[in-house]
Image (cartoon, rainbow, N blue to C red):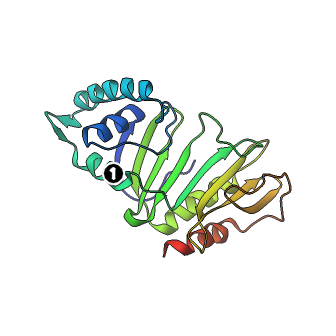
Amino acid sequence: MAAPTGQQLVVVTDDELLATAALLGMSWVRPLLTVDPSSRPQVAAAVVRGTTTLALRGLLVGDELDGALHHVVVAVGDTVPALTAYEADAALDHVPGSPIVEWYAGHDLLRVAALTGVNTFSTATREAAVTLVAGLADDTDGERHTVVLGPDAAGRRAGLVASRLGGRRMEVGQARDAEFAKPLDWPAAVRDLLVAVG
């Protein structure tokens, strides 16, 4: 995966994200690759581990969190990202262990969640996010697909699906058929998803 452009703000584990959210009195609702945020026992264990590693890495001193970490967790919070991209199987479900990319328009913030449960937060302009996500779709091959989600013109969640056979547009919840239209111009198609963001 191409490295995002912009300034890297903070790199943290899934455990550390959950611990930071807990320390801020928030719930983390975005997908993670090593912990299920809907499982109370998993989250509780992750918060203990994450609090320990935050302290060991100097990101938590006493009750003071690192400023960049505090900023990204508050910024993301329960916000729905303007763009989400992930590798999917034939049923268009996330392939376990594959990266998840999210871009938050209001903060020009990019999150890349990697296989190892490491989350990299960077600044990224709209065009940098479009380029990264379009590159993921262009690299799709084999039995896997890339799903890109974002708002449509009415603000509903809509999406694009890349496959080695081409691409198609879909609305979230639309029937998942195996028919793919002619190949899409991925940068233009991803930009079209962002029209509603402004």
**Is residue 14 shown left or right of residue 173?**
left
Query: Within 10 Å of the Cα at label 1, are there few (<14), some (14-19), or many (20+) other Cα atoms?
Result: some
As displayed, is residue 29 above or below residue 187? above
Question: In the image shown, does 70 or 134 lie closer to the viewer?
Answer: 70
Q: Position of residue 144 (x, y in %)?
A: 74, 43
Q: Position of residue 19 (x, y in %)?
A: 31, 34
- Residue 25: image quadrant is top left
Residue identifier under label 1: 72
As displayed, is residue 146 above or below residue 44? below
Which residue: 74% across, 57% down? Answer: 174
As displayed, is residue 167 above or below residue 30? below
Query: SS class of the residue under badge 1?
Result: helix
Q: Find the residue positioned furthest to the left.
A: 62
Which residue: 44% across, 44% down? Answer: 29
**Is residue 159 shown left or right of residue 122?**
right
**Is residue 90 shown left or right of residue 24?**
right
Q: Position of residue 134 (x, y in %)?
A: 63, 60
Question: In the image shown, does 167 or 94 lie closer to the viewer?
Answer: 94
- Give the tally of numbered discs: 1
Three-letter residue code for mark 1? Val
- Residue 132: image quadrant is bottom right
- Residue 173: image quadrant is bottom right
Q: Position of residue 101 (x, y in %)?
A: 53, 50
